[in-house]
Image: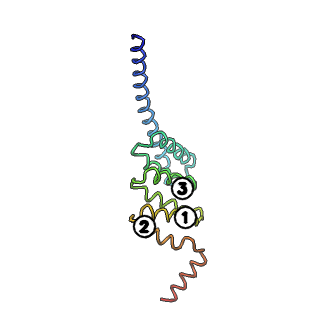
């Protein structure tokens, strides 16, 4: 009986210590992320702080994995995606934005995250097939979003070769 109480007491102390360490660990994580964010934002250009940008992206992924239910997680993921894109890490940006809209579909940044996936494939990665896929996904998932009109327009032109697009535009100009 005494042994049982002693083990129960030890378990409770261990659980309390783990909970306290968890809070301290989360605070340390957040402080580290804030310091990295400040460092990257200070220059105004993520490409000028490649080490800090990369560290911010990796720490944000670790934070999201450790604290997926934290209300700041989707916002942090979105910011890290912006940093990755600014640093020229387009595939990483696309990955992070995907985590935002897939894991937090009701978050206010979710529609923009999905849009930016398509836009990044279109403008930075020159992959019109993937851009079109993400634009179509956007219209299915967020048909009433304020970006829907713009996405429809982009979808109409995304798979047209640039030379053909210029010709279409020029022909349209002559008809007016």
Whether residues under marks 2 and 1 lie with C-beta atoms below 8 angstroms apart, the answer is no
Front one among 7 and 124: 7
The percent coordinates of residue 166 (x first, y second) are 57, 79
In the structure shown, which secondary structural element does the residue marked by tag 2 occupy? Answer: helix
On residue 3, the disc is none
Q: Say which element carries label 3.
A: helix
Nearest the camera: 109 or 143?
Answer: 143
- Expressed as whole percent of the image width and height from the top left, the position of residue 96 reads 51, 51
Query: Looking at the image, which residue is at 43% across and 56% down?
Result: 110
The picture quadrant where one finds residue 3 is: top left
Q: Are marks 2 and 3 in contact (CB under 8 Å)?
A: no
In the picture, the disc for residue 148 is 2
Residue that numbered label 1 is attached to: 131
Residue receiving disc 3: 94
Callout count: 3
Tag 3 near tag 1, CB within 8 Å: no
Residue at (44, 29) in percent of width and height: 21
- Vertical order, 38 against 169 (above or below): above
Q: Of marks 3 and 1, which one's residue comes earlier in the chain?
A: 3
Report the residue at 50% width, 70% height from top.
Answer: 154
Q: Residues within 10 Å of mark 2 (few under 14, many from 20)?
A: some
16 is higher (above) or lower (below) than 156: above
Residue 7 sits above or below residue 78 on the image: above
Q: Earlier in the sequence, mark 2 or mark 3?
A: 3
Circle 3 Cα neighbour tier, 10 Å, few/some/many (<14 / 14–19 / ≥20) = many
Say how the picture is coloured. Answer: rainbow
Separation of residues labelled 2 and 3 (CA atoms): 19 Å
Please identify, in this view, whether the residue under mark 2 or under mark 3 is nearer the observer. Answer: 2
Q: Position of residue 12 (x, y in %)?
A: 39, 22
Q: Earlier along the polypeptide chain: callout 2 or callout 1? A: 1
Q: Nearer the viewer, residue 142 or 22?
A: 142
């Amino acid at each position: 009986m005494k042994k049982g109480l002693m083990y129960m007491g030890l378990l409770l102390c261990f659980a309390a210590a783990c909970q306290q360490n968890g809070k301290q660990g989360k605070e340390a994580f957040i402080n580290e992320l804030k310091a990295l964010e400040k460092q990257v934002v200070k220059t105004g250009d993520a490409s000028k702080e490649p080490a800090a940008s990369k560290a911010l992206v990796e720490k944000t992924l670790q934070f999201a994995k450790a604290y997926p239910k934290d209300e700041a997680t989707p916002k942090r993921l979105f910011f890290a995606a912006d940093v990755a894109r600014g640093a020229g890490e387009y595939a990483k940006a696309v990955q992070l934005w995907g985590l935002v809209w897939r894991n937090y579909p009701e978050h206010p940044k979710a529609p923009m995250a999905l849009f930016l996936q398509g836009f990044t494939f279109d403008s930075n990665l020159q992959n019109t097939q993937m851009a079109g896929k993400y634009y179509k996904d956007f219209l299915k998932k967020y048909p009433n979003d304020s970006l829907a009109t713009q996405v429809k327009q982009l979808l109409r032109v995304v798979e047209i070769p640039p030379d053909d697009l210029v010709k279409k535009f020029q022909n349209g100009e002559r008809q007016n």
